[in-house]
Image (spheres, helix red, strand yellow):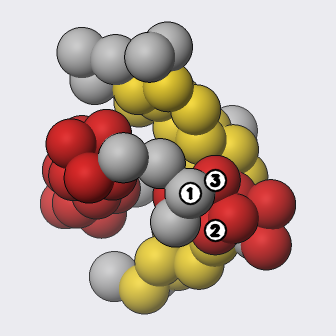
Amino acid sequence: MKVELIQRTADVLFGVPDDVHQEIITLVTAVARTPKPQAPEVAAAFGEWCWLVYTSHGDVIEVLDVGCAR
């Protein structure tokens, strides 16, 4: 599975502390391993402090937004 980040999301990902960065990477990894529905739709994944909003297109996961509550 290929993961693509929009620029705004990438900016957030690389501007957060290491522990938060790891939580986001864990969420992306979990999403990449989850079976996807046939039709693309917007979905969200939540960790202890962080979340991400994504959609999938075939074998590509597009991360649309990411954030943390810390």
Q: Is residue 24 visible?
A: no
Quadrant in which the C terminus appears: top left
- The nearer-to-camera label among 2 and 1 is 1
- The nearer-to-camera label among 1 and 3 is 1
Label 2 neighbour load within 10 Å: few <14, some 14-19, many 20+: some
- Mark 1, secondary structure of its residue: loop
Residue 6 x %, y %: 76, 70
Label 3 neighbour load within 10 Å: few <14, some 14-19, many 20+: some
Could you say which disc has been placed on residue 10 in the image? 2
Residue at (52% x, 66% y) in the render: 14
Establish if 25 lies above or below 4. Answer: above
Residue at (64% x, 68% y) in the render: 10
**How many numbered discs, if any?**
3
Could you say which disc has been placed on residue 12 in the image? 3
Q: Earlier in the sequence, mark 2 or mark 1?
A: 2
The CA distance from mark 3 to mark 2 is 5 Å
> Quick one: 30 or 6, which is closer to the camera?
6
Amino acid type assigned to the residue bearing label 1 in the image: Gly
Residue 43 x %, y %: 58, 33
Q: Are marks 3 and 2 in contact (CB under 8 Å)?
A: yes
Q: Which residue is mark 1?
A: 15
Residue at (69% x, 65% y) in the render: 11
Amino acid type assigned to the residue bearing label 3 in the image: Val
